[in-house]
Amino acid sequence: MLELCDIAVTLGEFALAADLSIPPASHMAVIGASGSGKSTLLSLIGGFLAPDRGRIYWNGNDITALPPGRRPVSFLFQDQNLFPHLSVAQNVGLGLRPDLRLSSDQRARLTRALEEVGLAGMETRRPASLSGGQQSRVALARVLLRARPLLLLDEPFAALGPALKAEMLELVARIADETQATVLMVTHDPQDARSFAPQTILIDKGTAHAPTATGDLLDNPPPGLRAYLG
Ligand SMILES: Nc1ncnc2c1ncn2[C@@H]1O[C@H](COP(=O)(O)OP(=O)(O)OP(=O)(O)O)[C@@H](O)[C@H]1O
């Protein structure tokens, strides 16, 4: 269970408040107009941004002061954070050990993770020689190996075509289910939210609202969200 208790943060002219709970193993969308604070919310949870007020709890433990590396969190961003000079296996191995000195057990897990995301045999390739979808799979394999219980996705598949995007979302859902991970996914695409996330956090007018049923929210969006969705 992730709890954001009375959180407030101000960035220049912008302010965001959040007071909400996310149940274990949720698949949750984060939706809101451009500039509403979706990435800010993820940064607060991931520890890249400290709140001015409030506490963040994970399973009852206060993680508000923990640096990103000590939080129970993995990230997936649109640029996938792949290092161009490293091979596929090395990029994935970084999820286990930043110095890449993997034990034989860790190497075996790495091989399994690559198989799981459909990249078996591509261990020595560099990211530049992969398609966009394959690059996304490398990033996903790294997430799979890290096996952190909270996965934060900031529009990671926005650059992929609709069919590939749907495939990657299914893969994320499967990986999250296997590890019982909670997933928070920022998206601009209501269809992604409907297919991936039974519940959605709406960010509107400076507030991240408590999760509501995605279908109900999108069928009857409040005025700000209606204007944004078009
Ligand atoms: N370091 C900063 N200093 C000042 N303002 C900031 C800073 N970081 C973000 N902001 C502002 O905070 C607001 C929220 O930004 P954020 O990136 O969270 O929005 P978003 O909903 O993710 O937007 P988008 O959908 O366009 O990616 C924006 O108005 C942005 O300009």
Image (spheres, helix red, strand yellow):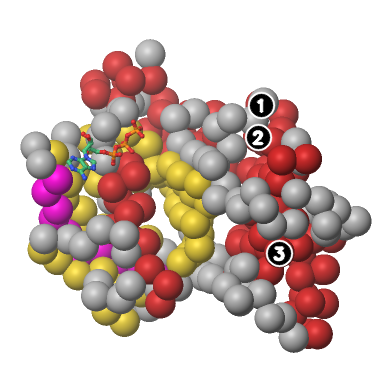
- The kind of residue tagged 2 is Lys
**CB within 8 Å, label 3 to label 1:** no
Q: Nearer the viewer, residue 201 or 45?
A: 45
Between disc 3 and disc 2, the foreground one is: 3
Residue 216 to residue 115: above or below: above
**CB within 8 Å, label 1 to label 2:** yes
- Which is nearer the N-term, disc 3 or disc 1? 3
Tell me the CA gap for discs 3 and 1: 29 Å
**Residue occupying the point 28% across, 47% down:** 40
**CB within 8 Å, label 3 to label 2:** no
- Rate crowding at label 1 as few (under 14), some (14 to 19) or many (20 or more) other CA atoms within 10 Å: few
- The magenta segment is 1-11
Tell me the CA gap for discs 1 and 2: 5 Å
Q: Which residue is mark 1?
A: 162
- Rate crowding at label 2 as few (under 14), some (14 to 19) or many (20 or more) other CA atoms within 10 Å: some
Q: Residue 133: tell me if it is visible.
A: no
Q: Which residue is mark 3?
A: 90
Instruction: Name the outermost residue toward the front.
Output: 85
**Residue occupying the point 66% across, 45% down:** 136
Magenta stretch, main secondary structure class: strand
Residue 103 to residue 228: above or below: below
Is 112 situated left or right of 153 in this image?
A: right
**Residue occupying the point 49% across, 28% down:** 189
- The kind of residue tagged 1 is Pro
**Splitting the image into four quadrants, where does ligand 1 fall?**
top left
Instruction: Specify the quadrant that holds the N terminus.
Output: bottom left
Secondary structure at numbered mark 2: helix
Secondary structure at numbered mark 3: helix
